[in-house]
Image (cartoon, rainbow, N blue to C red):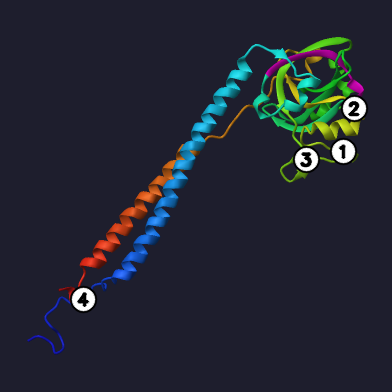
């Protein structure tokens, strides 16, 4: 005998009530809006990837091009991002008494970049990052052989100034603590005038005595845009699938499981 109050069903709970037409419309509109946003984010990452690949190609071309004269005063106002990592050369005399040590972490460990002003024949000055020295050689007296005198020629990569400092660390000119190669601030601290708005990373040509060690410029451009694009597109597809499932399921369901 069937227990009282039972209609002979299996005991399963009631099916979800179908969504009203208005609620279906609102849900579909919200899902469509989010879908468009996700697709837009994915497309933006695809465009960013194309831009990044083009940037990498242009920088690589500059790095491996024949060295050209470093920009002179007439060109300084136009020096910008398109000049970064340009292969350049310049000549002049180092002002070793005004060198600046900038904290650095390299493949050789922790230490300092040695930034030395180079005075050119026209009287202008260019900061040259001569290379890396370990902490034990921060004192110029420990690397006297590398303090070359007279006219020199430097070949390297043009770099844009790095104002302010590093992440969570601000330059402190008063105490001589430098965390970035801020050309203007270094020039002010060392009393340099007529200075170029960029600096030059010297190449790996050995210095007398072996220090500083040049040619340690790291050229790396993070490029995870394809991963981000696939993530956004994948989320858009999952949202579309979930929305279709919910809308179709709620539309076809009936109270009581009939």
- Looking at the image, do the residues carrying marks 3 and 1 touch, with CB atoms under 8 Å apart? no
- Does the residue at mark 4 contact the one at mark 3 (Cβ under 8 Å)? no
Name the secondary structure under disc 4: helix
Q: CA distance from mark 4 to mark 1?
A: 77 Å
Q: Residues within 10 Å of mark 3 (few under 14, many from 20)?
A: some
Observer-side mark, 3 or 1, equals 3
Residue 58 x/y as whole percent: 58, 23
Q: Which residue is mark 2?
A: 192
Q: Residue furthest left?
A: 1
Asked if residue 6 is positioned above or below residue 123 in the image, the reply reads below
Question: Label 1 to label 2, Cα distance in Å?
Answer: 14 Å
Residue 200 shown left or right of residue 150 in the figure: left
Which image quarter is the C terminus in?
bottom left
In the rendering, at what x and y percent does residue 160 appear?
72, 29
Q: Which residue is mark 1?
A: 173
- Of pointers 1 and 2, the one earlier in the residue sequence: 1
To which residue does mark 4 refer?
255
Residue placed under numbered mark 3 in the picture: 164
How far is the residue under mark 2 from the one under mark 3?
Answer: 18 Å
For the N terminus, the image quarter is bottom left
Residues 183 and 257: in front is 183
Highlighted range, magenta: 87-98
User: Alpha-carbon distance for marks 2 and 4?
Assistant: 85 Å
- Could you say where residue 92 lies in the image, as x and y percent from the top left? 84, 13
Disc 2 or 3, which lies upstream in sequence? 3
* Labels 4 and 1: the sequence-earlier one: 1
Query: Judging from the image, what secondary structure is the residue with disc 3 in?
Result: loop
**For the view shown, which residue lies furthest in the bottom direction?**
4
* Front position among marks 1 and 2: 2
In terms of secondary structure, where does tag 1 sit? helix
Q: Quadrant of residue 144?
A: top right
């Amino acid at each position: 005998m069937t227990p009282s109050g039972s209609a002979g069903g299996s005991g399963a709970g009631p099916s979800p009530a179908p969504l009203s037409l208005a609620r279906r419309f609102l849900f579909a509109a919200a899902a469509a809006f989010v879908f468009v946003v996700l697709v837009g984010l994915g497309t933006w990452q695809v465009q960013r990837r194309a831009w990044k690949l083009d940037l990498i190609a242009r920088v690589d071309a500059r790095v491996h091009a024949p060295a050209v004269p470093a920009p002179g005063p007439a060109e300084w106002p136009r020096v910008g991002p398109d000049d970064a990592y340009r292969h350049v050369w310049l000549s002049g005399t180092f002002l070793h008494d005004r060198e600046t040590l900038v904290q650095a972490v390299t493949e050789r460990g922790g230490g300092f970049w040695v930034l030395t002003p180079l005075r050119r024949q026209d009287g202008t000055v260019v900061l040259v990052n001569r290379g890396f020295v370990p902490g034990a050689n921060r004192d110029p007296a420990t690397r006297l052989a590398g303090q070359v005198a007279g006219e020199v020629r430097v070949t390297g990569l043009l770099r844009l100034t790095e104002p302010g400092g590093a992440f969570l660390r601000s330059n402190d000119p008063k105490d001589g603590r430098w965390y970035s190669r801020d050309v203007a601030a270094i020039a002010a601290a060392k009393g340099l005038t007529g200075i170029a708005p960029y600096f030059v990373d010297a190449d790996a040509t050995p210095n007398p005595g072996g220090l500083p060690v040049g040619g340690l410029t790291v050229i790396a451009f993070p490029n995870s845009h394809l991963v981000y694009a696939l993530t956004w597109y994948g989320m858009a597809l999952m949202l579309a699938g979930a929305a279709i499932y919910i809308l179709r399921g709620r539309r076809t369901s009936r109270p009581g499981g009939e």
